[in-house]
Amino acid sequence: MKLSKKTITNILAPLVTFLLLFGFWEWAVSHYQLPKWLLPAPSGIIQSMVVNFNDFWPHILITFETVLIGFLIAVPVGILLATLITSNKIISAALSPFVIFLVTTPLVTLIPIMMLFMGFGQKVRIIGVVIQAFSIVNMNTVTGILNVPIIRHELMQTMGSNKFQSLRHMIYPTAIVDIFTGVRLSAIFATTACISAEYVAGNHGLGSQIIKYSQFLKTTESFACIFYVTIIGLFMYGFVAFLQKKVIYWKI
Amino acid sequence: MEELVQKEVQTIPKIVFENINKVFHTRKQTIVAVKDYDMQVDQGDFVSIIGPSGCGKSTLIRMLNGIIQPTSGRMLLDGIPLDTSKPYSQETLRKMGFIFQQPNMLPWYTIRQNITLPLKIFGLDTPEYQEYADELISVTGLQKFADSYPIEASGGALQRAGVVRAMVHKPEILLMDEPFGALDEMLREQLNMELLSIWKRLNITIIFITHNVEEAVLLSNSIYVMATEPGRLVEKVDIDLPRPRSLEMITQPRFVSYTQRLVDLIGSVELRQIK
Amino acid sequence: MKKKSIRKKKGIDWMSIIPPWILLAIIFAVWEIAAKTTGISEYILPPMSKIIHGVITKFPGELLPHFLLTVRVIVLGFIFATILGISLAAIFSQFNIITKAVTPVIIWLVITPMITLIPLMTLWLGYDPVLRTYVVILQATPIIALNTLNGFVNVDNDKVELAKSVGCTRMQRFTKIVFMNAMPQVFTGIKLGSIFSTIAALSADIVSGNAGLGFKISQFTKYNNVYMSYGTIFLVGLIGLTLYKIIERIERRVVLWKN
């Protein structure tokens, strides 16, 4: 494998930044002799991530599962709904403020109500993730579809293409960049929503553990859980970026 | 008897515009894009529509192709009125090929995939048609670009591909909306000559939109001159120059007198507007 | 007569205003009828009339202080995050190597749900209402910085070179060329920032709360006043929507060249 100078800077520069960041954190903690319960050193956090891995693992798994399932439902739902909304001028005019309303309303606020009739199970949390994550995919897909140049619609019209053919050959590929922007954001929304849901509901998942550990002033363990949440988020983000590279094979 | 029927068929014009009007309502104002337009085009004819920008010339062929609907009036194809109240059937659309001002290629498909897209949509994806597509690709010298993506091809190649895409389903009519307007003079002349040879070979009917007077005279049997506000027909000029035409004709006195006349017409139209 | 026609020209686009209201009326009607006829428990589907009546009667007394607190947290945090995010991006974008070095860090911050820090921040700061504003700033700044930085970095190099050749100073090049060209992305970032702000503020309310609309929602739910929970959620949605629409208005004023 050949590494160009550019690739090396691309990898090295952020690495140095992270090292500096954590180095400073480590130094600050030891220099000011901050107690562990107030702010643990990164070395301690990483140590805890390894040592207590067996305690964390089931929660990591459950959080990851909730995020992933919710995300995988939210994305197609968001794209499909956006397709329906944009299929008709009046429908799209009628629904567009509601599309924004759905995104700007933190739907995590619905979780307490949903728990009333659905209990504390994982199902509630998955639904919470879905409703928070689908809306941003929906909004970006609507934007993407509405921004399709008229001339491309005209092209499909000259061939008498039906709705499905237009979507497949022209509309989705044109809107794909916006769709992916929505999907990437929805991966973030999904993680945030899942943690919020776990805060409120029950004692499963990393969110509940963060609360539990901080209540007992076990800040190191709390931070370890936060780092694992971050890793899940990075995984989702990387997964979407990878997918985007695979799907959009042409240059724009 | 048979001969008589033959003659009867031939006298039916390929395309008829009857008293066509198009009014656009925008949020701010009402624009009369086309007013009381009449035109008859025979089978195998080459007709240009010329006029300043905003005179509704591309609106006309968009209406014929069913992209937009006329506000009033009738359009006939082979003597049969087109039903503009609903989208055209693919049977009707197959008779026409539309060439846009821009190449209008889809960047995620190769040139060949772009060219054969109409076959997929029209349900004509048969070996015969694929072969025909290949033939068109080689006739227009697109072989070396066929498997590249649009971003990798030159503007001229893309515009050629746009022409081929409009012809791949063997239409009887080509509607061309200033197809070579964005290209440089040399390339434009070259493509115009290629177009004439294709037209002659396939005996196809062409309506050509342009604002270039020389181009219109060089290509057409007759030229419809339009004016703006409202978009309307001013005069029809028949071009009685021998065929095959060549670029050398441009400097001949008869050619020049035609261009001069058209320039005067368009100029006077614009003068009238200033008043 | 003429004046009237001019006013009409400026006019309102009814096609985009009427349908949403009609739809809203339909939603309310269907909700009301469903609540009253299907026999679904009032704890799950309270009648719309009760929700609206509840919000209106309880707004001036019970809800207003919480409403004001949440609005203040969202708006303050959001404004601060916008200034901070754009300034950071402006500084980072001056040096290629710094842009490369910090982008992954910003992404990392965008991905981290800042509400995970609320329990710890409560530990550090107590039940300080300012804590919520910090959470909003922490959550919204990275997404604004990320989009803005993207815009700053992807400016057409020819334009910058042109500005250089006519002798623009570095500062002029940045404010006149780079910043103006990046405006669409800057506004994308700001809009997302407003959404992140609302979500963060409400999550913070729910987690750390003894005040704020998020706190009221969980309290209403706890005491089985579900109709008030719904009403409060609608209220929150309205705050988010209003903020978003205001930004959109400003965007339309500023970004004139983008239809």
Image (cartoon, rainbow, N blue to C red):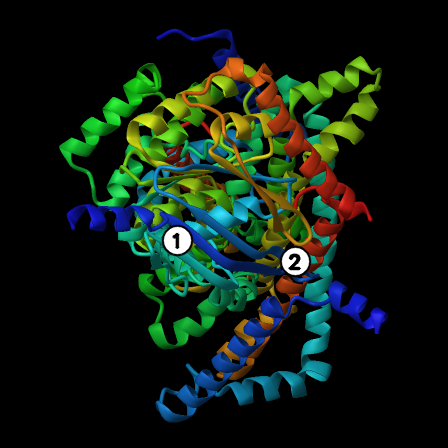
Using the image, determine if residue A244 lies above or below residue C239.
above
Residue density around tag 1, few if under 14, some if 14–19, many if 20 or more, within 10 Å: many
The answer, for residue C88, to whether it is visible in the render is no
Q: CA distance from mark 2 to mark 1?
A: 37 Å
Pair 2/1: label in front = 2
Host chain of mark 2:
B
Where residue A173 appears, x then y in whole percent? 39, 40
In this orientation, which residue lies closer to the viewer: C178 or C99?
C178
Residue in the image at 55% along x and 52% along y: C115
Where, by quadrant of the figure, is residue C161 drawn? top right
Callout 1, which amino acid?
A: Ile
Residue B31 numbered tag: 2
Using the image, determine if residue A26 lies above or below residue C80.
above
In this orientation, which residue lies closer to the viewer: B129 or B234?
B234
Where residue C105 appears, x then y in whole percent? 56, 31
Residue in the image at 78% along x and 16% along y: C164
The answer, for residue C131, to whether it is visible in the render is yes
Q: Quadrant of the N terminus of chain A?
A: top left
Using the image, determine if residue A139 lies above or below residue C6.
above
Where residue B19 appears, x then y in whole percent? 52, 60
- Asked whether the residues under the numbered discs 2 and 1 touch, taking CB atoms below 8 Å apart as contact, a structural biologist would say no
Residue in the image at 60% along x and 59% along y: B24
Residue B215 numbered tag: none
Where, by quadrant of the figure, is residue B107 drawn? top left
Host chain of mark 1:
A
Circle 1 residue: A79
In this orientation, which residue lies closer to the viewer: B171 or A50?
B171
Would residue B165 be found to the left or right of residue A27 on screen? left
Residue in the image at 41% along x and 61% along y: B84
Where residue A188 appears, x then y in whole percent? 47, 46
Residue density around tag 2, few if under 14, some if 14–19, many if 20 or more, within 10 Å: some
